[in-house]
Image (tube, rainbow, N blue to C red):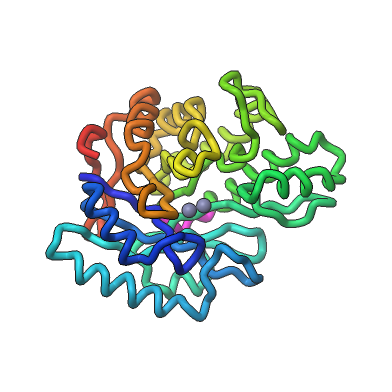
Amino acid sequence: MRANYHTHCDYCDGRASAAEMAAAAAAAGYSILGFSSHCPLPFPADGNMELSRLGEYRDEIRALGRDWAERGLEVLYGLEIDYIEVQCSPRDAVFAEAGLDFSIGSVHYIDLPGSGRFAVDYDGEEVARWLSLYSGGKDAGRAFYEAYYENLARLIEPGGFDILGHFDLVRKNNGARPDGRGRYFDESSAGYLDAAFAAARLLKGTDIVAEINVGGMARGKVSSPYPILPILKELRSLGVRITFSADAHAPGHLGAHLEDARELARAAGYDSVAILTRGSWTETGIDET
Ligand SMILES: [Zn+2]
Ligand SMILES: [Zn+2]
Protein backbone atom coordinates (compact mmCIF):
# COMPACT_ATOMS: atom_id res chain seq x y z
CA MET A 1 0.00 0.00 0.00
CA ARG A 2 1.69 3.18 -1.16
CA ALA A 3 1.03 6.16 1.11
CA ASN A 4 2.43 9.66 1.50
CA TYR A 5 1.42 12.02 4.30
CA HIS A 6 3.74 14.89 3.45
CA THR A 7 2.32 16.88 0.53
CA HIS A 8 2.42 20.62 -0.10
CA CYS A 9 0.28 22.49 -2.62
CA ASP A 10 -0.49 26.08 -3.58
CA TYR A 11 -1.97 26.88 -0.16
CA CYS A 12 1.66 27.17 1.02
CA ASP A 13 4.93 26.85 -0.92
CA GLY A 14 3.88 23.94 -3.17
CA ARG A 15 4.08 24.57 -6.89
CA ALA A 16 0.79 22.89 -7.94
CA SER A 17 -2.86 22.80 -6.91
CA ALA A 18 -4.16 20.15 -4.52
CA ALA A 19 -6.13 18.62 -7.43
CA GLU A 20 -2.95 18.34 -9.53
CA MET A 21 -1.10 16.72 -6.62
CA ALA A 22 -3.91 14.18 -6.11
CA ALA A 23 -3.92 13.27 -9.81
CA ALA A 24 -0.14 12.87 -9.74
CA ALA A 25 -0.35 10.65 -6.65
CA ALA A 26 -2.93 8.37 -8.27
CA ALA A 27 -0.78 8.16 -11.42
CA ALA A 28 2.27 7.27 -9.29
CA GLY A 29 0.43 4.35 -7.67
CA TYR A 30 -0.48 5.86 -4.31
CA SER A 31 -3.61 4.72 -2.53
CA ILE A 32 -3.34 7.24 0.33
CA LEU A 33 -2.37 10.90 0.03
CA GLY A 34 -2.20 13.20 3.04
CA PHE A 35 -2.03 16.95 2.47
CA SER A 36 0.19 18.79 4.94
CA SER A 37 0.37 22.47 4.06
CA HIS A 38 2.71 24.60 6.15
CA CYS A 39 0.56 25.89 9.01
CA PRO A 40 -0.42 29.52 9.60
CA LEU A 41 2.15 31.34 11.75
CA PRO A 42 1.70 34.36 14.04
CA PHE A 43 4.09 36.41 11.86
CA PRO A 44 4.32 36.91 8.06
CA ALA A 45 6.02 33.92 6.38
CA ASP A 46 6.05 33.46 2.60
CA GLY A 47 5.93 29.68 2.60
CA ASN A 48 3.06 29.26 5.08
CA MET A 49 -0.70 29.31 4.70
CA GLU A 50 -2.56 32.35 5.97
CA LEU A 51 -4.93 31.64 8.83
CA SER A 52 -7.84 33.14 6.88
CA ARG A 53 -7.48 30.35 4.29
CA LEU A 54 -7.64 27.40 6.67
CA GLY A 55 -11.39 26.80 6.19
CA GLU A 56 -11.11 27.03 2.41
CA TYR A 57 -8.19 24.57 2.49
CA ARG A 58 -10.17 22.09 4.62
CA ASP A 59 -13.18 22.30 2.27
CA GLU A 60 -11.02 21.83 -0.83
CA ILE A 61 -9.18 18.79 0.57
CA ARG A 62 -12.43 17.25 1.83
CA ALA A 63 -14.03 17.75 -1.64
CA LEU A 64 -11.00 16.13 -3.29
CA GLY A 65 -11.37 13.22 -0.88
CA ARG A 66 -14.98 12.70 -1.99
CA ASP A 67 -13.97 12.91 -5.68
CA TRP A 68 -11.17 10.41 -5.37
CA ALA A 69 -12.74 7.93 -2.92
CA GLU A 70 -14.34 5.79 -5.61
CA ARG A 71 -11.21 5.95 -7.74
CA GLY A 72 -9.05 4.26 -5.11
CA LEU A 73 -7.24 7.23 -3.55
CA GLU A 74 -7.87 8.06 0.10
CA VAL A 75 -7.19 11.78 0.62
CA LEU A 76 -6.43 13.09 4.11
CA TYR A 77 -6.60 16.60 5.47
CA GLY A 78 -3.56 17.55 7.55
CA LEU A 79 -1.03 20.26 8.31
CA GLU A 80 2.71 20.45 8.82
CA ILE A 81 2.78 22.39 12.09
CA ASP A 82 5.83 24.34 13.21
CA TYR A 83 7.24 24.29 16.68
CA ILE A 84 8.58 27.78 17.40
CA GLU A 85 9.19 28.51 21.06
CA VAL A 86 6.35 30.57 22.57
CA GLN A 87 4.92 31.34 19.13
CA CYS A 88 3.63 28.14 17.55
CA SER A 89 3.10 24.49 18.51
CA PRO A 90 0.97 21.52 17.40
CA ARG A 91 -0.79 21.88 20.76
CA ASP A 92 -2.15 25.34 19.94
CA ALA A 93 -5.96 25.52 20.10
CA VAL A 94 -6.27 26.65 16.48
CA PHE A 95 -4.86 23.29 15.29
CA ALA A 96 -6.67 21.15 17.86
CA GLU A 97 -9.93 22.76 16.70
CA ALA A 98 -9.19 22.40 12.97
CA GLY A 99 -10.52 18.81 12.84
CA LEU A 100 -7.38 17.49 11.13
CA ASP A 101 -7.08 13.85 10.05
CA PHE A 102 -3.40 13.96 11.06
CA SER A 103 -0.56 16.39 11.60
CA ILE A 104 3.19 16.55 11.11
CA GLY A 105 5.24 18.32 13.77
CA SER A 106 8.37 20.03 12.42
CA VAL A 107 11.11 22.38 13.48
CA HIS A 108 12.16 24.82 10.76
CA TYR A 109 12.91 27.92 12.84
CA ILE A 110 15.55 28.41 15.51
CA ASP A 111 16.63 31.54 17.37
CA LEU A 112 20.31 32.21 18.10
CA PRO A 113 21.95 35.11 19.96
CA GLY A 114 23.01 37.72 17.39
CA SER A 115 21.42 35.83 14.49
CA GLY A 116 17.81 36.13 15.65
CA ARG A 117 15.09 33.81 14.36
CA PHE A 118 15.73 32.08 11.04
CA ALA A 119 14.68 28.93 9.19
CA VAL A 120 17.40 26.26 9.04
CA ASP A 121 16.19 25.15 5.59
CA TYR A 122 16.25 28.59 3.96
CA ASP A 123 18.52 29.36 1.04
CA GLY A 124 22.11 28.34 1.90
CA GLU A 125 23.69 31.78 1.61
CA GLU A 126 21.01 33.32 3.82
CA VAL A 127 21.69 30.69 6.48
CA ALA A 128 25.43 31.41 6.18
CA ARG A 129 24.75 35.12 6.70
CA TRP A 130 22.61 34.51 9.79
CA LEU A 131 25.18 32.17 11.30
CA SER A 132 27.93 34.73 10.66
CA LEU A 133 26.01 37.08 12.97
CA TYR A 134 25.96 34.54 15.82
CA SER A 135 27.34 36.04 19.03
CA GLY A 136 26.62 33.37 21.64
CA GLY A 137 30.21 32.34 22.33
CA LYS A 138 30.11 28.68 21.17
CA ASP A 139 31.30 27.37 17.85
CA ALA A 140 28.54 28.59 15.49
CA GLY A 141 28.09 25.17 13.85
CA ARG A 142 27.62 23.55 17.23
CA ALA A 143 25.21 26.26 18.37
CA PHE A 144 23.30 25.68 15.11
CA TYR A 145 22.64 21.96 15.61
CA GLU A 146 22.23 22.18 19.37
CA ALA A 147 19.51 24.82 19.01
CA TYR A 148 17.80 22.72 16.34
CA TYR A 149 17.74 19.53 18.44
CA GLU A 150 16.74 21.39 21.61
CA ASN A 151 13.72 22.70 19.71
CA LEU A 152 13.03 19.23 18.35
CA ALA A 153 13.04 17.92 21.93
CA ARG A 154 10.59 20.64 23.00
CA LEU A 155 8.34 19.68 20.10
CA ILE A 156 8.45 15.94 20.87
CA GLU A 157 8.05 16.02 24.64
CA PRO A 158 4.50 17.35 24.89
CA GLY A 159 3.45 15.58 21.65
CA GLY A 160 0.09 16.44 20.08
CA PHE A 161 1.00 15.42 16.51
CA ASP A 162 1.27 12.15 14.54
CA ILE A 163 4.41 12.34 12.42
CA LEU A 164 7.76 13.95 13.21
CA GLY A 165 8.99 15.85 10.14
CA HIS A 166 12.50 15.44 8.65
CA PHE A 167 14.39 14.53 11.84
CA ASP A 168 17.75 16.03 10.78
CA LEU A 169 16.65 18.95 8.60
CA VAL A 170 19.50 20.97 10.19
CA ARG A 171 21.91 19.23 7.79
CA LYS A 172 20.15 20.54 4.66
CA ASN A 173 22.68 23.36 4.20
CA ASN A 174 25.62 21.50 5.74
CA GLY A 175 26.68 19.94 2.41
CA ALA A 176 28.42 17.08 4.20
CA ARG A 177 30.76 14.72 2.33
CA PRO A 178 30.33 10.95 2.74
CA ASP A 179 32.67 11.05 5.77
CA GLY A 180 30.18 13.36 7.53
CA ARG A 181 32.27 16.55 7.48
CA GLY A 182 30.23 19.51 6.38
CA ARG A 183 30.27 23.26 6.11
CA TYR A 184 29.09 23.82 9.71
CA PHE A 185 29.53 20.55 11.61
CA ASP A 186 30.65 16.93 11.34
CA GLU A 187 27.56 14.69 11.10
CA SER A 188 29.55 11.67 12.28
CA SER A 189 30.94 13.39 15.40
CA ALA A 190 29.96 12.26 18.88
CA GLY A 191 28.79 15.79 19.75
CA TYR A 192 26.41 15.94 16.81
CA LEU A 193 25.03 12.43 17.26
CA ASP A 194 24.60 12.93 21.03
CA ALA A 195 22.42 15.97 20.37
CA ALA A 196 20.34 14.08 17.82
CA PHE A 197 20.03 10.94 19.98
CA ALA A 198 18.91 12.98 23.00
CA ALA A 199 15.92 14.16 20.95
CA ALA A 200 15.38 10.66 19.51
CA ARG A 201 15.10 9.10 22.97
CA LEU A 202 12.06 11.25 23.68
CA LEU A 203 10.19 9.34 20.95
CA LYS A 204 10.54 6.04 22.81
CA GLY A 205 7.17 4.73 23.95
CA THR A 206 5.17 7.44 22.15
CA ASP A 207 2.84 6.91 19.16
CA ILE A 208 4.79 9.43 17.08
CA VAL A 209 5.92 8.06 13.71
CA ALA A 210 9.25 9.28 12.26
CA GLU A 211 9.84 10.00 8.59
CA ILE A 212 12.24 8.77 6.03
CA ASN A 213 11.93 11.97 4.04
CA VAL A 214 13.24 12.24 0.46
CA GLY A 215 12.07 15.83 -0.15
CA GLY A 216 15.59 17.27 0.16
CA MET A 217 16.83 14.72 -2.38
CA ALA A 218 14.02 15.48 -4.82
CA ARG A 219 14.99 19.15 -4.70
CA GLY A 220 18.71 18.43 -5.06
CA LYS A 221 19.63 19.75 -1.60
CA VAL A 222 20.99 16.56 -0.01
CA SER A 223 22.27 13.30 -1.48
CA SER A 224 20.49 10.95 0.94
CA PRO A 225 17.13 10.92 2.72
CA TYR A 226 16.53 12.46 6.16
CA PRO A 227 17.65 11.13 8.59
CA ILE A 228 21.18 9.77 8.17
CA LEU A 229 21.61 6.04 8.86
CA PRO A 230 23.09 6.32 12.41
CA ILE A 231 20.05 8.33 13.52
CA LEU A 232 17.63 5.94 11.83
CA LYS A 233 19.33 2.98 13.50
CA GLU A 234 18.92 4.71 16.84
CA LEU A 235 15.20 5.27 16.11
CA ARG A 236 14.88 1.61 15.20
CA SER A 237 16.54 0.52 18.45
CA LEU A 238 14.11 2.76 20.36
CA GLY A 239 11.14 1.03 18.70
CA VAL A 240 10.05 4.10 16.71
CA ARG A 241 7.90 3.37 13.64
CA ILE A 242 8.57 5.04 10.29
CA THR A 243 6.70 6.39 7.26
CA PHE A 244 8.06 7.21 3.80
CA SER A 245 7.58 10.90 3.03
CA ALA A 246 7.93 12.54 -0.36
CA ASP A 247 7.68 16.03 1.24
CA ALA A 248 6.28 16.78 -2.22
CA HIS A 249 6.23 20.38 -3.43
CA ALA A 250 5.54 19.48 -7.10
CA PRO A 251 3.73 16.59 -8.86
CA GLY A 252 7.03 15.04 -9.98
CA HIS A 253 8.14 14.56 -6.36
CA LEU A 254 5.42 11.94 -5.77
CA GLY A 255 6.93 8.50 -6.24
CA ALA A 256 10.49 9.85 -6.57
CA HIS A 257 13.35 8.26 -4.60
CA LEU A 258 11.17 5.53 -3.08
CA GLU A 259 13.92 2.97 -3.59
CA ASP A 260 16.34 5.21 -1.66
CA ALA A 261 13.84 5.27 1.21
CA ARG A 262 13.38 1.49 1.13
CA GLU A 263 17.13 0.88 1.02
CA LEU A 264 17.77 3.14 4.02
CA ALA A 265 14.90 1.56 5.97
CA ARG A 266 16.27 -1.94 5.34
CA ALA A 267 19.80 -0.87 6.29
CA ALA A 268 18.45 0.29 9.66
CA GLY A 269 16.62 -3.00 10.21
CA TYR A 270 13.06 -1.97 9.35
CA ASP A 271 10.84 -4.33 7.36
CA SER A 272 7.57 -2.39 7.55
CA VAL A 273 6.23 1.16 7.55
CA ALA A 274 3.31 2.69 9.45
CA ILE A 275 0.16 3.43 7.45
CA LEU A 276 -2.68 5.72 8.54
CA THR A 277 -5.87 4.59 6.82
CA ARG A 278 -9.53 5.13 7.70
CA GLY A 279 -8.58 6.80 10.95
CA SER A 280 -6.18 4.26 12.39
CA TRP A 281 -2.56 3.24 12.07
CA THR A 282 -1.46 -0.13 10.78
CA GLU A 283 1.74 -1.52 9.26
CA THR A 284 2.59 -2.58 5.72
CA GLY A 285 5.69 -4.36 4.43
CA ILE A 286 8.39 -2.18 2.88
CA ASP A 287 8.14 -4.13 -0.38
CA GLU A 288 4.43 -3.22 -0.60
CA THR A 289 5.12 0.49 -0.59
ZN1 LIG B 1 9.21 20.84 6.65
ZN1 LIG C 1 7.19 19.79 4.27
Residue 26 inside the magenta-drawn segment: no
Where is residue 284? Give x, y as percent.
22, 40
Residue depicted at x 47% and y 78%: 53
Query: Foreground residue, 21 or 55?
Result: 21
Query: Foreground residue, 91 or 145?
Result: 145
Where is residue 288? Give x, y as percent.
20, 37
The relative height of residue 1 versus residue 74 in the rendered view (above or below) is: above
Name which quarter of the figure residue 184 lies in.
top right
Where is residue 228? Give x, y as percent.
50, 30
Start-end of magenta stretch: 158-162
Residue depicted at x 39% and y 56%: 7
**Residue placed furthest toward the left:** 70
The relative height of residue 165 versus residue 21 in the rendered view (above or below) is: above
Residue depicted at x 35% and y 65%: 18
Where is residue 66? Give x, y as percent.
20, 71
Count of marks overlaid on the render: 0
Q: Main secondary structure of the magenta part?
A: loop
Residue 160 inside the magenta-drawn segment: yes
Q: Is residue 83 left or right of residue 72?
A: right
